Image: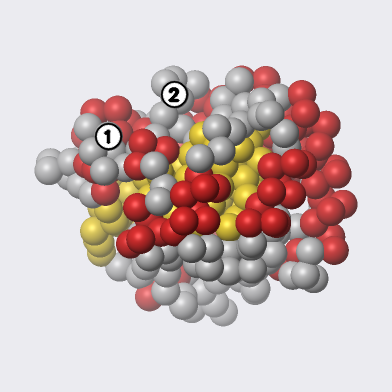
Amino acid sequence: MYSPYLFARGSELLALRAVLAEGGDLSRLLPITEPVVTDLAALRRCMEAYAKSNQPLGVVINPYRHEFNDGGARSEAFRAGLQDLFSKHPNLLPTYRVHAGVTIAKAKKFFNLYKNRPVVLAYHSPTLSPAELKNLAAAPEIIFHVVMDQSITTDQWSAIPSKKTIDLRDHFNKLPRNADYSGREFFTDRHKLIGKSIAGIGDYATVGRNLDIGGGPPGAIAIHPTYRNKAGDIWIEHFVSDETDRSVGDIGAKFLDAAGKLTLAVADRPKEFGFNSAISEFQRHVEDGTFPGLGKNKEHQIHHHIRLMLETIADT
């Protein structure tokens, strides 16, 4: 199983929908999305698309970042706004963050809210004892336990059934500026553990776990596609525009510069990058000399990464 963990924003949600639209074997895919804005329109469209395709999608129901950083007051309205979709579609999975403030009593409230239907637990520095975790993990409604960023103890880990455990880690080395990226970096080889010590793996795609709300126009445009080397390991390569000064040049030209470098690399190493509709979109923009916008650049990178990971896991 592969679980990309993404924030429920425009580009991320469109990437998840693009993966659906491309089709193919999605049996090993369980995306999890964490809302960070209270406007539910885009999230509902994504959930409806996954419901229609009968593909699983996890949605964090106790978000805490950005517009949900008010201590939980907005979360109740958010949950109410999605209750109809959860009620009708068992493939839409309420996902509960078991963090330091979660007690057994609070966990039971979650189960009472979503009775007799599949759910996901995501652990982030829980303070529950191993015995409490073992008792919690015994609930048959839990189809997967997502361990976030190695944030549990060895004893806590042993309390969670390995056949339902997804190991979620951030493999993207996020830098302050696009201009700071260059060359290639190792990304992960943890997919080789699936079916041995864990049921699946997860990552934050090529976005990273830190929420970046964004600012002004970037000085450089960067594209961060992942690829698979001959050993079956996942690496990431950074393609950055030559012009990195914010006050010089135009964003569209910078995008075409970076995308042109990517398409040349794909043509030279097609087996490493693979082929999907996200790659073809980059190629089309280079051929046509068009700039789709920064959001589409991000969407295509996430889309490509998800397809590459699914192909890699299928071949492992």
SS assignment at label 1? loop
Q: Residue at x 68, y 66 (%)?
A: 65
Q: Disc 2 vs disc 1: which is toward the camera?
A: 1
Residue identified by numbered label 1 = 195
- 221 is higher (above) or lower (below) than 289: below
Q: Which mark is residue 266?
A: none
- 220 is higher (above) or lower (below) than 247: above
Residue that extends furthest to the left in the rendered view of this protein: 231
Mark closer to the chain start, 2 or 1: 2
- 93 is higher (above) or lower (below) than 206: above
Q: Is 247 on the left or on the right of 38, as rendered?
A: left
Q: Is 241 on the left or on the right of 33, as rendered?
A: left
Residue identified by numbered label 2 = 27
Whole-percent x, y for residue 29 in the image: 46, 32
Whole-percent x, y for residue 154 in the image: 33, 62
Residue type marked 2:
Ser
Whole-percent x, y for residue 43 in the image: 72, 42
